[in-house]
Amino acid sequence: MAINTDIVSIRQGASAFDETNVLNETGHKNMLHLIHLRWLAVGGQIATILVATWGLNIQLPLFQMLSVMVCLIAFNIGSHLRWHEERVVSNRELFLAMLVDIASLTAQLYFTGGINNPFVFLFLLQVILSAVLLRSESTWLVVGITTLCLAFLSVFNHPLVLPLNSTYKLADLYASGLVICFVLNAALLVIFITRIGRNLRAGDATLAALRQRAAEEEHIVRMGLLASGAAHELGTPLATMSVVLSDWKRMPQFANNADMLEEIEEVESQLIRCKSIVSGILLSAGETRGESSAKTTLHDFFEDLVQEWESSRPAQHFEFNNQVEEEFTVAFDSTVKQMVFNVLDNALEVSPNWLRFDVSKNQEHLFLTVTDQGPGFRADILEQVGTPYNSSKGRPGGGLGLFLVMNVARTLGGSVQARNCSEGGAEVRIVLPLSSLVVQDGNLENQAR
């Protein structure tokens, strides 16, 4: 029970770490959106200054406004350089970035009429973005800060002065600016809220997948502990049965009876197979030695694997095709053999007359493909292949085979693909990265790590 608790705690810790990484990645994408929005703000400020100065002949404090804009551009360049390399963005860093935007907007409004400037409603954009991007406490801080900025601008500001010969009235300019501000707010909200919402939905989907994976891995741990315990318990009765069978073979009444001796040998061979299965369970759990990886060659491993499987299964027509021409040293975990056995056993169950096992590779991956001539996967089974108890066999505990195969492959950095063949039957392909299998310079210890 203590071991079980420790393992589950480790799994939960790893899951929490993965969830934190997903949240940070979502925050990074949102920070990039803020940087893009800031560039649009700079472009909008330049356009507004040009229209007000050249089109309306309004005298603006250009030096002060351009100084604010230069500071904003410098901050945005620095942000781009930092967040291009740094992937972890916290809520605090998003909050500080939004404070810079609020300060920049407040400064520009201070020099252009304060609260009488229709673009003061751009503060609403900051509040809405903070509600989407930040935690609730940070959002309320933004609400408080923008309110203080509005109060400040209502008292302290540089009023806009229209030229005496201007054909525009201040009320008309305010109404036009209000319309432009509304269009800007609406367009920016649609564009960026859509993007941010897409980021948040993608992050939620990734978190859901990680939590599902953590639940599946915890399920595997519990099954592994149960299987390991059962293997230990079975060791003693199997050894006793082996001793009894050896004694029977030496007894005259059995030794002189050819039929009985043949049956005893058959039972003994099945007993040896049971002991091999139990040893494989313990070996996969790492309980019989420190490391469960074995150094061998690719061709030898699969030749031995096929020979062992074919000698103990009633396959009528089994084809093995090794398409890997070059030979190299690999470190295969014992679970790889069990994983392939599992897929072959499933294929043999639905297609006892014919099945094929292909081994191939490209520059980066090793492909283990099992093809059968069975009825294929049902559509609903194929959509959720690799999930526990997802089986069409209808028996208790069914559907764990591909579930275990999927998780072993994922542990090795690979994946499992399943599909129905156009000519009938099904194909299951295990994809494993060569980098996690091939031994470089004979260094098995480092490779196993």
Image: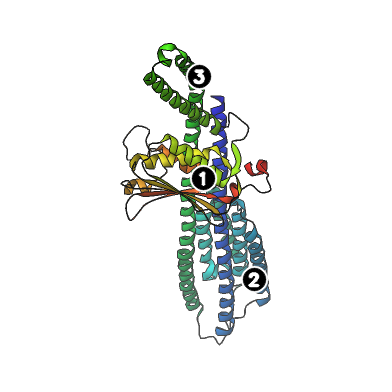
Front one among 58 and 228:
228
Q: Is residue 353 left or right of residue 216?
A: left
The kind of residue on which mark 3 rests is Ala
- Residue that carries the numbered disc 3 in the rendered image: 239
- Circle 3 packing at 10 Å, graded few (<14), some (14-19), many (20+), is some
Q: Residue at x 67, y 71 (%)?
A: 70
In percent of width and height, residue 172 lies at 47, 78
Label annotation for residue 410: 1
Camera-side residue of 11 and 33: 11
Tell me the element at label 3. Answer: helix
Please report contact status of discs 1 and 2: CB closer than 8 Å, yes or no: no
Which class describes the residues within 10 Å of circle 2: few (<14), some (14-19), or many (20+)? many
Task: Please provide percent x and percent y for residue 337.
Answer: 50, 39
Determine the secondary structure under disc 2. Answer: helix
Which of the numbered marks, if any, corresponds to residue 141?
A: none
In this view, the residue in front, 327 or 100, is 327
Residue 365 shows in the view: yes
State the image coordinates of residue 392 (x, y, percent, origin top left).
32, 40
Q: Is residue 136 left or right of residue 73?
A: left
Helix, strand or loop for disc 1:
helix
Q: Report the residue marked by disc 2.
A: 69
- The kind of residue on which mark 2 rests is Met
